Amino acid sequence: MSGLFGIVSSKDCRQSLFYGTDYHSHLGTKKAGLAVLNHQFTRCIHDISTSQFKSKFIEELPKLKGRKGIGVISDFDSQPIIISCSFGKFSLVTSGLLKNKNELAREIMSQGGSFSEMSSGMINSTEVIGKLIARKSNIVSGIEYVFNKISGSVSLLVLAREGIYAARDISGKTTLVVGQNDESFAITSETSAFPNLGFKPVLELRPGEIVLITSEGVKEDHDILKNDKTFRNGKICSFLWIYTGYPASSYEGINVEKVRENCGANLARNDQIKADLVCGVPDSGTAHALGYSMASGIPYRRPLVKYTDGYGRSYTPPSQEIRNKVAKLKLIPIKSVIEGERIVVCDDSIVRGTQLKNQAIEKLWRNGAKEIHVRIACPPLMYPCPYLLSTRTKKELAARKVIKKIIGENNFDIEDFIDEKSPLYQKMIDTIMKELGVTSLKYQTINDMVKAIGLPKEKLCLYCWTGKD
């Protein structure tokens, strides 16, 4: 997924825009961009796959003078885009997954439209959304048109003369939060962008909600908001708390770090093993391990440390080769902490399984671990996400690979592998455990994960685990 940040200020906004956007660097590894509007639009986009956001954009700041601007850390597409249409110019950033991108692009081209943002060699999803907005008579009706046309999910920010239009994904998978300080209003995907910039959260958008942010505040009258009856009951992505989100962020008022501690505590309460230390796979496994340690009384230690944030997250890079390289280089084992110890290793999830096995577990065994007990903060992932850019096929998922090994290509009831009380579920876990080469393996159950988050089950997207919206 991508991270979005926008600001409208009574003063020059570039410093807050720069740092607010940078605070989303954990959400994307491919592209980043900023756009400001002064007398005209000024935009800059850079590749951040080999270097950090700050180093690429610091020299751009002098030319980004303005009182309102938007920024993005992108998982794939070059953003922001700028479009000129019948009702004027606007700049756009988006987050989400446009499943029917090619279908929409063909429709636009069949009616005489064209696409120019082709730096990746493919049609840019953000440009498709921009072209759909431009079909209508104004930005609000254009955004509503987008929500009615797309398959998948999209949250977006539109920078225009009158301010920043913000729209939360109509299915509610991602979120947007408005913040305020003495001189500005801002909008963010991650509330962790707010504290050090002096912002306090004042409004979390509802699924499908569209607001206009100006230097005077958030305009929520019915000229801007579509009638409530058109809003769908959103289900926010559970994985935001388990892995994707930043520890200092909150969604629906619920903090990420606290949820991860709850997950670890749940795993400990349902465990009977004896161990000498608990650790997390840095960084996203750390809070899960702290929760496990606090609930179990087993000391938390750091047998694996991450060298620098510059290596990024091994889950998000686009290719398996790059993911493996990042995981191998960023985690450094400490032999004096590992040798002879019985170790509980907490992690957020097992997606493909290769990093955990080859880069964490292998390093612990090689440095003398006596036992390795792996505890995972979410259930086995069964389905690729249809709403956000993460896993794209079933065959990537560790659990699916094991099911194929157990059952073959024959028809089977996937519910037998989702139900943690079934014999086939346990056989799947035992097989994954043997493939990882660990002493024991347990996953958190769906119900315990829901309790750890603290929202009603019907408010959470659990598609990755159940295949159901």
Image (cartoon, rainbow, N blue to C red):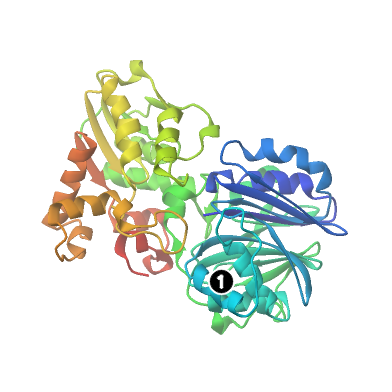
Query: For the residue marked with disc 1, what is the amino acid?
Result: Ala
Q: Residue furthest top?
A: 336
Q: Which residue is mark 1?
A: 105
The reply, left or right, for residue 417 in relation to residue 161 is left
| Secondary-structure class at tag 1 | helix
Which residue corresponds to the image point at 56% horizontal and 41% vertical from the top-left? 49
Circle 1 crowding by C-alpha within 10 Å: few under 14, some 14–19, many from 20? many
Instruction: Tell me which corner region of the image, top left, top right, bottom left or bottom right, holds residue 106.
Output: bottom right
Instruction: Tell me which corner region of the image, top left, top right, bottom left or bottom right, holds residue 271.
Output: top left
Q: Is residue 276 visible?
A: no
Percent of width and height locating residue 309? 54, 33
Which residue corresponds to the image point at 60% horizontal and 68% vertical from the top-left? 128
In the rendered image, the vertical position of residue 312 relative to residue 2, given as above or below: above
Percent of width and height locating residue 406? 14, 52
The reply, left or right, for residue 52 in relation to residue 286 is right
In the rendered image, the vertical position of residue 261 relative to residue 280, given as above or below: below
Q: Is residue 41 visible?
A: yes
Residue situated in front as seen by the camera: 31 or 266: 31
Residue situated in front as seen by the camera: 343 or 146: 146
Residue situated in front as seen by the camera: 403 or 15: 403
Percent of width and height locating residue 448? 31, 54
In the rendered image, the vertical position of residue 388 relative to residue 306, given as above or below: below
Q: Residue furthest left?
A: 423
Residue situated in front as seen by the camera: 87 or 185: 87
Percent of width and height locating residue 131? 65, 71
Which residue corresponds to the image point at 64% horizontal and 44% vertical from the top-left? 22
Q: Quadrant of the C terminus?
A: bottom left
